[in-house]
Image (cartoon, rainbow, N blue to C red):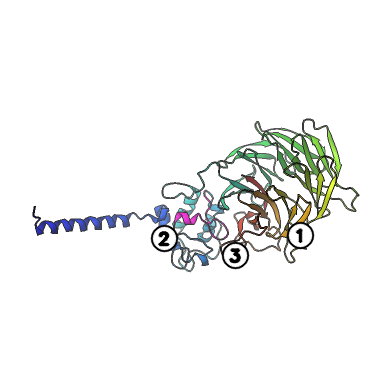
Amino acid sequence: MKISPAYIFVFSILIVLITLSSCTNEKATPDYNQFPEEVGKIMFTKCAVSGCHNNLSKGAAGDLSLESWDKLFEGGRNALSVIPYRSDYSTMMYYVNTFSDLGVTLNPTMPYNRPSLSREEVLLLKNWIDAGAPNREGFVKFSDKPNRKKFYVTNQGCDVVTVFDQETLLPMRYVNVGNSAGIESPHNIKVSPDGQYWYVISTGGNSIQKFRTSDDSYVGEAMLGLRNWNTMTITPDGQKAFVIDWSFNGDIAEVNLQTLSVTHNLGYNNPHGSTLNSSADTLYVTLQNSSEILKIFVNDFSIDQIVNLFSTPPPVSLLPHEVIFSPDGNKYFVTCQGTKELRIFNTANDQLLATIPVGGLPSEMVVSSAYNYLFVTCPEDTVNFPGKRGSVAVIDYSTNSFVKYIYTGHQPHGIGIDEDKGLVFVANRNASSDGPAPHHLGECGGRNGNVSFIKLNTLDMLSNENGSIKKVEVSVDPYAIGVRN
């Protein structure tokens, strides 16, 4: 069949019109790279622009690209700029907000050297973040994978816990803890052996609080009374916790973690650090203001044994702070703050095996079974890195010998480990005024601290792409670390 020229002309016009219509529709409903439309308009016209937070320019903008929702959640040089559900802990808000009644405001105002966002735009971003900062399909970052590996950092200055994603090493949530309006100072945090729950206690609080690890939601709390709660130990079956009150007439509270009921055991002389032996029948407790530890038989608290931590009495009190066991249970390690030492003992007979000098105020410890390393945080070491405060001492516990000091940041205290990822996590308090200035102020004031990372295979610090030491800034006074592996 012969097709007339007129038919071909009309058909061609129709194709052109359909194509133009399709282009018009695409422009009318832009994708904005998975940002919701109204958020995307702000990002693409005022943020992810030339010379600022786009892929080409991000190196001069904190390594933060805003060209897509996925890029936003890759974070910048020091952390995520948006924390889902928490505009009050999202640094993006600090810099785009110029309205004091809407939260923290910081300089330089963003967009940089451009007109500030309107109040309506700031409120739009704030409400979006508080709703989880979802993408165009409504998905909230990190809301999948209920068995996600995480670690938790207590922030004493703000009564929050920072939740880190272990895969990306980025803070993914901030969780409020405590049950009063005042600052309770969350001091210690532990994850249950089965990884299903995490627990937190505060030095100015009156309870042990229980949260799910799957979504970090609050479960309940056991009321302990208002005392100086410092450390806790959870039994291997996850059924009980022993919570320690560092006071002259100290309490060792036995908590049923299923019913959240409490049995008090009073009368101990400044108990502090605590751990269970490998058979979980004996609780080891350091007596902080002495040179002794206490061994308590957990089935009968009336049976206990004092262990002197010296073969020859030292000229000053050892002030034992923390105690942990080697992976095989044959040795235990005690940090002695009075003499700036680590002391190593034979579990079978409590014989002193080695005394190893470490840095000032030796505090927390963690063990690597893969490398036979014991890591000791020394937050007040001002000797080994002149002009700096703090170190982490590395000990080979198979030979009871010192390996090296590592500078991880200002006043390292809390410490945790991921053997599979080959990293040690260190919480650097940065609480003293001689520490480095934080990048920004937080919602509750005070000095933000940071978390840094030691590589197990080399004992070097993990670095950013530009070669600088990777330090993720978190809220005020990061103190303790709990790990969900």
Disc 2 secondary structure class: helix
Q: Is residue 2 magenta?
A: no
Which of the pair 101/166 is nearer the observer? 166
Considering the whole magenta stretch, tell me its main secondary structure: loop
Q: What x and y, as percent, mark residue 353?
A: 83, 48
Q: Is residue 192 above or below residue 465?
A: above
Residue 162 left/right relative to 407? left
Q: What x and y, as percent, mark residue 312?
A: 91, 49
Specify the amino acid type for callout 3.
Answer: Gly
Specify the amino acid type for callout 1.
Answer: Asp
Which of the pair 477/95 is nearer the observer? 477
Which badge, 2 or 1, is on the more N-terminal residue?
Answer: 2
Residue tagged by mark 2? Answer: 44
Nearer the camera: disc 3 or disc 1: 3
The stretch in magenta equals: 68-84
Residue 340 left/right relative to 425? right
The label number, if any, that marks residue 381 in the structure image: 1
Spatial CA span between label 2 and label 1 = 48 Å
Q: Is residue 83 magenta?
A: yes
Label 3: how many Cα within 10 Å (few below 14, some 14–19, many 20+): few
Disc 3 secondary structure class: loop
Q: Is residue 305 visible?
A: yes
Q: Residue furthest front?
A: 399
Q: What x and y, as percent, mark residue 277?
A: 76, 38
Label 1: how many Cα within 10 Å (few below 14, some 14–19, many 20+): many
Residue tagged by mark 3? Answer: 467
